Image: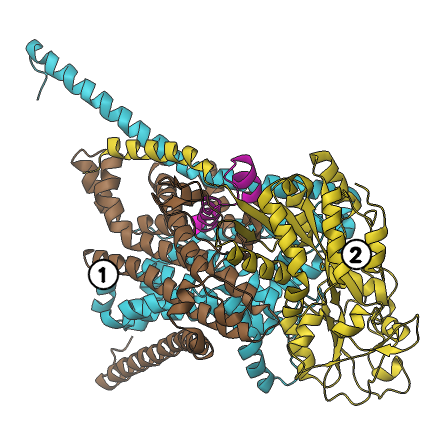
Amino acid sequence: MSANNVSDLHQVSDRLAHNAMRHFSERLIEALLFAAAAVSVLTTVGIVYVLVSESIQFFQVVSIVDFLTDTQWTPLFDDAHYGIMVLISGTLVSSGVALLVAIPMGTIIAIYLSEFANGKVREVAKPVLELLGGIPTIVFGYFALLIVTPLLQKVFPELPGFSLLSAGLVMGIMIVPYIASLSEDAMRAVPMSMREGSYAMGATKLYTAIHVVVPAAVSGLAASYILGISRAVGETMILAVAAGMQPNLTWNPMEPAATITSFIVQVALGDLPHGSIGYQTIFAAGLTLLLITLAFNIAGQWLRRRYREAY
Amino acid sequence: MFKYSKLVSAMAVAGVALFGAQAAQAQIIKIDGSSTVYPITEAVAEEFQKAKKNAIKVTVGISGTGGGFKKFCRDELDVSGASRPITAKEMTACKEAGVEYIEMPVAYDALTVVINPKNAFLKQATVEEMKTLWEPAAQGKITKWNQVNPAWPDAPVKLFGAGADSGTFEYFTEAMVGKAKSSRGDYTASEDDNVLVQGVSRDVNAIGYFGYAYYAENTARLKALPIVNPKTGKAVEPSAANVENGSYAPLSRPIFIYVKAKSLAKPEVREFVEFYMKNADKLVREVKYVPLPKAAYEGNLKHANDKKIGTVFGGKNEIGVTVEDILKREAKM
Amino acid sequence: MQPMTTEQIRALIARGKLKDTIFQALGIICLAVGLLVIFLLVSDMLMRGLDRLNLDFFVEFASRRAAQSGILSAWVGTILVMFVTALAAVPLGVAAGIYLEEYAKRNWVTDIIEINITNLAAVPSIVYGLLSLGIFVYAFGFGQSILSAGLTLALLILPIVIVSTREAIRAIPAMIREGSMAVGATRWQTCRYHIIPYAMPGILTGVIIGLARAIGETAPIITIGALTFIAFLPPMPFTATGADGVSAGLFDWVMSPFTVMPIQIFNWTSRPDPAFEVNAAAAGFVLMGMVLSMNAIAIYLRYRMRKNIKW
């Protein structure tokens, strides 16, 4: 329809009216989608509110300097110490062990499935791997305690019954599906044309995978790594069962230690009266964890920005 | 084709139906609280529902003693199980919410100190020896058995115990070390007592403590250590008989349920509480706790009838209180 | 520079092929480790729980006697809670991902939202439980019901769904979008007819991983009030309930108290009676079966959709 004649103006204004309607429904959908995105922001606001409001009461009793520098964590004992570094060391060591297992293993599996494996292998292996992510974390915890620890004790006879090493290894295995599956999706989405160009130049599959596909998929890979790191830091039950609940300031994975998360779950489900200072420690610990992961995420985001490729 | 109108109308129906769904909560007795008391309450609830042919429904949660009291003092529960008496803070919360309660001891839990069955040198222990072993000053220093008692060998000490947030921990430290929550930190703690059972059963030099039921179910793998009763000077080993006659001290503690007075006005809750007290002796034994004397259960029912509101402990825990004492004392909100 | 001799070229190719083969072996080994763990766990649970795996186990309620203790309320509860979780998390997460990727302007606000979402993935699940207790159970008044549990878990897995949605959408080449815009489609039309169908396989991966995690969670569900002993089922729609014979409405089950499989397993493993270990192993095996069936549906859909992507 064109607006060449005056008599066409009715048709034009109808069309414009229809456009306005289209514009309105577009706006409505955008508003609904925005509301969905806003839910995640509201969740953070809620979590921050819960953590901060209880932590404020906590920090009126315990000084922040003590909190950050004390080397003992015994908030529930009669002689209470509140040194969060003890728990942070446990969290960092266990996550470090887990990621040392999960990132290489997950990436290798992803490259293998996306570049080397044939269709049938891929379509069977991916779901089975995802099954790994569906095992309840308690089952993993007991697996670490009752099967992995004795196995490790054959290799390292001085390994105690509870250790960060055992829990960290099992945690790593649990995270492999996150990294492998999401990375494989990212690599599969790289257009065949890029691969074909590389093969045409005489490159091998491995070379193409590492120098062409991975850089193109780095955004997805980085997203999966960040998700994996987040999962490792936030994991609760495996550590609660297999790493022992002994607050222990150590950087040696072959020792038992408590992490921020295992401490929180221990107290939240325990016998302490709610509102007592012992109970409020979980909010201070949770807040610390949130700030640490925020720092990691900001760093990760910055790195992603720098190395992203567009095609 | 995606019909927005269908979606919107479906959501409207769902919304209306949700609001109408509030009504289906009749006739459920809500219980929550300590995981120590849970096995007893579960047994009672199971038998009660069977006896009533499912006409009355009972639900039981395990939020912990603290979690249970929090819900109880928000008027959300009919009964709360506790492994320790209600604290002063919780009493205030209940008072402010207008929740009146009746405190009822339901069983003894005998805290058992266990050692490996192959342990040849430990025949009994005194409270002083336990204190030397477990007090905060022992951390890092008392690492060999002969440091506690020179008669014992020069073997490493392997300690297993309850997590610091549990009632077991609080009671043990108060009874053995003399001050609640005063303990050394370098021991293997676990929330799951089965893990402690495993730990002690695998190491000849190990020693641990947990509730009697976990020992009773694992007598093949563990040995109970007799503790010298400070009042009589005789070493007593934990058993149902020794707890009932009061000779196993100071490590036997009463565990409680707190019943909301308003709920007792409801016929189903009253029936439940009566059933609980009448069958407690049998069911408590079945789950390997130690029952109170029959007079105690009858006393509880009498308190329910007389509306003996409040707690006899004044918001603090006490070691070595007998059930007769509990029944005689005055209750305060 | 001298041109390479034939021998040198052949040697180069052989080296490349060797690296390929080594990497393939490495990939298969890593995959095998993951599969081995699953196999160990599942067969361990099967062997230990075999005695108890009979029809009675599925239709009996929990009991203090191990031989009569079954998972009826647990598996019904898990299915209902997962249903609510999926219904809440999938539309919300996909909508949020679409908004952030297609509609939002690239400025510091969206950067903050992106950091915020990946940060949420690191929050320990029990903090979600505490948050939901305050919001869903008390403030919204949903009480300790299946609805609260489903919403809690939905919030928990929202970051995974959003991140994988975004990555899936990001992987779609610009030419698809540009082609659609060129023929006059609006943003929403582009999304609906082009972007979402192509992104579906990636979105489904995120949904699978998310739901598999949600089904195994214990700590947050206990916090919002899931029960451990409940010897009756949520009222089925339109069946009579209670002595007064009032018929249950269509949605009464959503507000009903409940329990789930991981809680039952958790409770049984911490009982002193060793006979309960058999029950716990059997229940763990059944839970794995439930995860597999849940994944199978999504995996089948994803398989079908992946075949259609050709670029």
Chain letter for the residue marked with disc 2 in the picture: A
Whether C251 is drawn above or below A117: the answer is above
Q: Secondary structure at mark 1?
A: helix
Q: Colour of chain C?
A: brown
* Residue in the picture at 79% in, 59% down: A77
Question: Quadrant of the rendered structure where residue C248 is?
Answer: top left
Please provide the residue range marked out in magenta: C132-160
Whether C80 is drawn above or below B184: the answer is above
Q: Is residue A311 magenta?
A: no
Whether residue A202 appears in this view of the structure is: no
Which residue, as the protein is rendered here, is positioned at the far top?
A6
Q: Colour of chain B?
A: yellow
- Looking at the picture, tell me which residue is in the foreground, A39 or B179: B179
Residue contact between numbered discs 1 and 2, judged by CB atoms under 8 Å: no
- Looking at the picture, tell me which residue is in the foreground, A180 or B132: B132
| Foreground: disc 1 or disc 2 | 2
Disc 1 and disc 2 on one polypeptide chain: yes
Q: Name the residue that disc number 1 marks.
A: A192
Question: Local crowd at mark 1 within 10 Å, few (<14), some, or many (≥20)?
Answer: few
Type of amino acid at the residue the image marks with label 2 = His
Query: Which image quarter holds the N terminus of chain B?
Result: top left
Q: Name the residue that disc number 2 marks.
A: A81
Type of amino acid at the residue the image marks with label 1 = Met
Q: Position of residue B283 (x, y in %)?
A: 63, 65
Q: Position of residue C91 (x, y in %)?
A: 35, 43
* Residue in the picture at 30% in, 57% down: C298
Q: Position of residue B26 (x, y in %)?
A: 50, 41
Q: Is residue A256 left or right of residue C229?
A: right
Answer with mark 1 or mark 2, whichever residue precedes in sequence: 2
Q: How far apart in space, not on screen, are marks 1 and 2 (Cα)?
A: 59 Å
Question: Local crowd at mark 2 within 10 Å, few (<14), some, or many (≥20)?
Answer: some
The prevailing secondary structure element of the residues shown in magenta is helix
